[in-house]
Image (cartoon, helix red, strand yellow):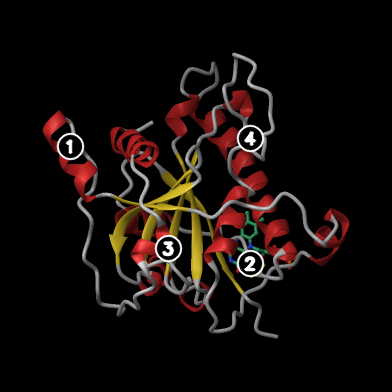
Amino acid sequence: MSKSLTVRTTLATLVLVPSLLLGCRKESENNTSSTPKPTATSQAAHNEQKKTAEIVTLPPPRHSSDMSVEEAIAKRKSVRHYKNEPLSLQDVSQLLWSTGLNTDAAVDGVSSATRHYPSASATYSFETYLVVGNVQGLESGIYHYDALGHSLVRMKRGDFRHQLTVAILGQRMVEDAPMSLVFAADHTRNKNRSGTRGEVKYLDLLEVGHMGQNVSLQAEALDLGTVVLGSFKDEAVAAIKKLLELENEEPVYIMPVGKEAR
Ligand SMILES: Cc1cc2nc3c(=O)[nH]c(=O)nc-3n(C[C@H](O)[C@H](O)[C@H](O)COP(=O)(O)O)c2cc1C
């Protein structure tokens, strides 16, 4: 885990600011004020981060629905056109829950927590980021999902959907969707495995497929549409890393989500 991620996660578990406090102020595309990135190495810098980070507690997810898993599988398809309608914070919570902590799993002393998807040796190499432009009750910005706290940590203020579209060389659905999820791998979490770096990456790429499928099926059950975007060039990876201010993580999948425009 990178230092910045450790700080983000620690902050998320320490500080809870109700999402309603943030309101749903509409941001212009050019409003790019940034919460300082938590690259703290000293205690003083760490404390400064605690003061500035904003945490959004997500509403509790549901554990059942009217749609059967068979129906969700049958309906799943790539959706690339979205209505200009906001997502609800409840929907965002539910989508993230599908890749989040499995609170029903037994704590066995080996793995203290498991998630709703499998991971080779339970290393859970991925972090989830949100590029938010049109979600009710959530200010536009870039957020990190803290799976342990089922909360969001705001990293930047502003609507960055256009920048993300440019970063991935013009896949317009990202600009049109109210929000996109970005799954980014920290390949070093698997570094103690005996395999080569290439094998480690291979395992991580298998893992993200499970995450993407969970989100796809969850979106169907919420009557939302999504598509997995993963066909990027190296230059796109570099641009996404820059936009999200990622140090050690490699963005692998982007999933825009919204109401399908039929
Ligand atoms: C690893 C992977 C990467 C993908 N990358 C993209 C992408 O960059 N852009 C896109 O529009 N669709 C992308 N797709 C979606 C496929 O184009 C889509 O799943 C395929 O055309 C089948 O259509 P369906 O999902 O509606 O069944 C990707 C799918 C996978 C599994």
- Of the two numbered discs 4 and 1 on the same chain, state the one appearing first in sequence: 1
Q: CA distance from mark 4 to mark 3?
A: 26 Å
Relative to 254, residue 85 above or below: below
Quick one: label 1, few (<14), some, or many (20+) residues within 10 Å? Answer: few
Q: CA distance from mark 3 to mark 1?
A: 26 Å
| Tag 4 secondary structure | loop
Query: Is the C-beta separation of discs 2 and 3 under 8 Å?
Result: no
Amino acid type at mark 2: Thr
Q: Position of residue 224 (x, y in %)?
A: 67, 70
Q: Which callout, 2 or 1, points to the residue nearer the camera?
A: 1
The residue that disc 2 covers is: 226
| Tag 1 secondary structure | helix
Q: CA distance from mark 2 to mark 3?
A: 14 Å
Say which of 193 and 259 sits in front: 259
Residue 35 appears in the picture as rendered:
yes
Quick one: label 2, few (<14), some, or many (20+) residues within 10 Å? Answer: many
The residue that disc 1 covers is: 47
Query: Is the C-beta separation of discs 3 and 1 under 8 Å?
Result: no
Q: Position of residue 18 (x, y in %)?
A: 40, 55
In the rendered view of the protein, which quadrant contains the C terminus? bottom right
User: Which quadrant would residue 45 be assigned to in this image?
Assistant: top left
- Of the two numbered discs 4 and 3 on the same chain, state the one appearing first in sequence: 4
Amino acid type at mark 4: Thr
Residue 42 appears in the picture as rendered:
no
Relative to 88, residue 230 above or below: above
Residue in the picture at 59% in, 63% down: 91
- 216 on left or right of 150: right
The residue that disc 3 covers is: 131
